[in-house]
Amino acid sequence: MTLKIKDFKHYKKVYADSVKNPEKFWAKQAKTFNWRKPWKKVLENDFRTPAVKWFVGGKLNITENCLDRHLKTQGDETALIWEPNDPSRPFVTYTYKELYQAVCQAANMLKSKGIKKGDRVCFYMPMVPELTIGVLACARIGAIHSVVFAGFSASALADRIKDATCKMVICSDFNARGSKNIPVKKVVDEALKKKCDSIETVIVHQNTGEKVPMKKNRDVYWHKAIEGQSKSCRATQMDAEDPLFVLYTSGSTGKPKGVVHTCGGYMVYTAFSFQNVFQYEKGDVYWCTADIGWITGHSYIIYGPLLSGATTVMSEGVPTYPDAGRFWHICEKHKVNQFYTAPTAIRALMALGDHWPSHYDLSHLKVLGTVGEPINEEAWNWYKDKIGKNTLPIVDTWWQTETGGIMISGLGDLSPQKATFAGYPLPGIQPCLVNAQGKEIKGNGKEGLLCIKFPWPSMIRTTYGDHERCRQVYFSAFDNMYFTGDGARRDKKGMYRIIGRVDDVINVSGHRMGTAEVENAVNEHDNVVESAVVGYPHDIKGQGIFAYIIPNKKVTNEAAFVKEIRAVVTKEIGPIAKPDQIRIVSALPKTRSGKIMRRILRKIASGDTKNLGDTSTLLNPEVVKELLKKK
Ligand code: WTA
């Protein structure tokens, strides 16, 4: 186990030491893992290029640390509990030994299909154990996993497969989600028609077992492919800086980019942050409700907990199926000790009534966590009161796909609590606030753009196939700093509150997307000349999507048009990106240089029409009147 912080005084000391001598601090944590060969140098630090390396020359395999090293001491303890969508079906457990064997077997299956170190394997699957097993099987043989959230459309999936030139897709037949049965293999088939030439094999896991078409010489069922494969598989030796996975995420411009994380640093940081943020103790049962299609699932369902020897719960379903008590039922059933979810889920459950949690025994809970978006005070209070009985700590964890692990957060019940404040940085993390000119804003009681001024082990190394984009997006805005894209406030005591994105990225139900991406999808409709998409405050989703659209020809049936726009976005990206509000307009407010003035559109979308600010620099100020009139 890595260093465990005991109380807030201890945190302060550890934090100060970690900043004074980061290399010594992280080397000490890294030494608690199994390495095939030790590193020669702890850190190579070049933020400008960027070319950051941790544990240089060190050799390891992350799965030996997730699985093999626990076999002797806790081989028969539960590693994974899988809770199916349908509560009448039995749950499934894997001990560490069983998970080890399943991963080895799947690794041999991948090898038998020609997958080698460095090859990219795409996953498009619901939350079933085979997803975790498959991901770890890739890591076992050094293949790079690229998990795509199974709610994305065929087009979005095809883009991601092509960008990473994946050799294989692993999918399911169907996805059982609430009362729906969503076709998964069908989406893969559609995606693969879009020039995904690099794909050689599709492995289909039978989830619901309904028949799906299988293409000869390409598609094979998981249970068939695994037949006869050995349950042991020597792990491939990886360099600390070899890529472990690619995960696509949205930015303010262009298509989603593949964030690349590497083996050594990611391992050390996800384990260290998991153990401290959740104050994990041996024997604890931990449940994170995220989907493995997002970074939270990677770091805090799979890697962080398994590296720590924890029992990690994975659930297939949704919070409201069969009813709004499902989360609390699962907590009771598996005696969950740490529970980690998103504010949007809390808000949705809060709206369905206080009585749901009261029916269940939540007495095993010790720590409650939230992630993905700012949590509003009302939701924080409800979580604290109704789930935490006013005694449990809430860890409001701020981080990003690019940071790999939790950056700013309370540590269990050790840290001071303040609603809507993520709190203090984890040891080794050096956040700062800067102004628009990149000058650091020192002192407390200040607000600014959130940057990180020193490398940390699980930071983004590159964006797949386009290193320059990585430099430009994250490391060029301010000299020698990583720019997060978020705005933040530091209170009088130095606690951080995340205000939200300052770029054109929106956060809808904790799903991150670029407004440009949604606009591109909207513009695919034949009758759209131009569109502008902005976020606006939404009671449950945090942010909703508001699309202003200039049609080509007059729209005669508005309801039908709105439906078509939503359908085109669903086709291009997926249902998560469907605009909540659509307004047909004749023009968009533009600056003299032709840029859309989104500030005005955001204000109008949020109903804040009184204070539109300076509109005198607009090329077409008359359009504002039209936008206001239509309200
Ligand atoms: C937002 C999710 C406020 C933030 C792990 C960030 C948060 C983006 C919080 C990253 C939080 C995440 N409080 N905002 N606790 N956690 N965010 O890459 O805007 O899906 O930049 O990673 O979510 O989203 P991503």
Image: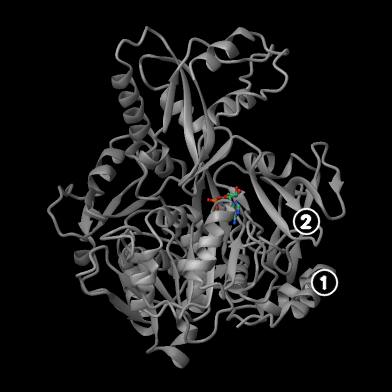
Check disc 2 and give the amino acid type: Asp
**Residue furthest to the left:** 211
Along the line of sight, the residue nearer the viewer: 292 or 533: 533
Residue 371, placed above or below residue 567: below
Name the residue that disc number 1 marks: 16
Question: Residue at (55%, 17%) from the top-left corner?
Answer: 628
Q: Is residue 213 visible?
A: yes
Q: Mark 2 packing: few (<14 Cα in 10 Å), some, or many (20+)?
A: some
**Residue 46 badge:** none
Task: Give x and y (percent) for residue 247.
Answer: 49, 51
Residue 419 lies in what quarter of the image? bottom right
Left or right relative to 112: residue 4: right
Q: CA distance from mark 1 to mark 2?
A: 19 Å
Q: Earlier in the sequence, mark 1 or mark 2?
A: 1
Task: Give x and y (percent) for residue 416.
Answer: 70, 70
Q: Mark 1 packing: few (<14 Cα in 10 Å), some, or many (20+)?
A: some
Left or right relative to 364: residue 377: right
Give the number of the mark in front: 1 or 2: 2
Secondary structure under tag 2 reads loop
